[in-house]
Image: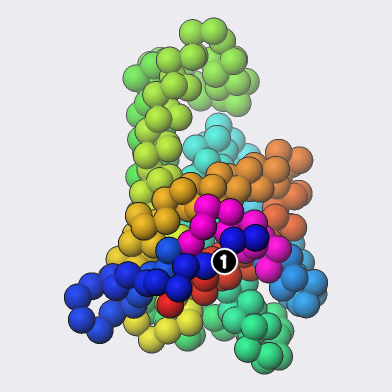
Amino acid sequence: MSQVDSGAVPVFYGDSPRVRRIPVDRPWAWLSAGWRDMIAAPAVSLTYGLLILAITYALLLVLWQFESFWLVLPMTSGFFFLAPLLATGLYETSRRVQAGEPVSLGAAFSAFKRNPTQISYMGVLLGLFHLGWIRIALLIFALFFGLGFTPSWDTIIAKLTAASAIPFWAVGTVVGALFAALVFAISAVSIPMLVDRDTNMFVAVATSFTAVRLNWPAMTLWAALIVAFTAFGIIPAFLGLAVTMPLIGHATWHAYKDVVE
């Protein structure tokens, strides 16, 4: 497998983080390293994944109880926006595995304490993107199908599977992809960086954006792999998230350590 380029580019002028240039096939190494972390800390990784699965089902139950189950589609697609934050404990677990420190659920759940203010700011930023996407998705739906109906699950499915829904899917896919690309650019390595270093959100976001810009072929592959593994986890009634979420989280830590010098 190709190795990481020894050259690095500074994010800002002067003393600042430096971003390495990496080969396009590097994301496969991150997945391999992430899998090794899961094997090294199986109890923490799988428990973390099961907790995320439990939260997902609790949210679905709330939507069902309030007769808002039709919101599952935009919220599921928006899951990609919040996933980098939800994986914070997995980054800490990988950090500990790599450093030879003991791992535990308590340590994973305490990851926010390493840089609480800045990680919280990132959480607010990603949450705003998530809410913004839900609003825009609903607006796109209203523009194509109107508002003169009761938004039941059966109604939504009927409209989305009709031949007339093709323009809706096209527009929604393009807009969603733009949202997702922006969120990926600012969060690809920013939250692992905040867990690892005493830095602020602006430096972390700028570093992440620079890493994606300089390594767009490899980062495009990495984004596609994240989408594929997440979709694979969501399709079987969200059950696969218990495995794919920890794998992606651990792999993201190694992406950060690979890219940021």
Q: Position of residue 145 (x, y in %)?
A: 42, 15
**23 lies above or below 235:** below
User: Which quadrant is the C terminus positioned in?
Assistant: bottom left
Residue 124 located within the stretch drawn in magenta: no
How many numbered marks does the figure carry? 1
**Which three-letter amino acid code belongs to the residue tagged 1?**
Gln
> Is residue 115 visible to us here?
yes
Q: Position of residue 103 (x, y in %)?
A: 70, 85
Chief secondary structure of the magenta portion: helix
Residue indicated by mark 1: 3
Q: Residues within 10 Å of mark 1 (few under 14, many from 20)?
A: few
Start-end of magenta stretch: 22-33
Q: Nearer the viewer, residue 193 or 46?
A: 193
Q: Tag 1, which secondary structure?
A: loop
Residue found 54% across the figure and 8% down from its top:
163
Q: Position of residue 172 (x, y in %)?
A: 42, 28
Residue found 35% across the figure and 29% down from its top:
139
Q: Position of residue 112 (x, y in %)?
A: 50, 79
Q: Nearer the viewer, residue 112 or 64?
A: 112
On the rendered structure, is 138 left or right of 39? left
Residue 25 located within the stretch drawn in magenta: yes
Q: Nearer the viewer, residue 134 or 11?
A: 11
Residue found 35% across the figure and 55% down from its top:
213
Q: Quadrant of residue 210?
A: bottom left
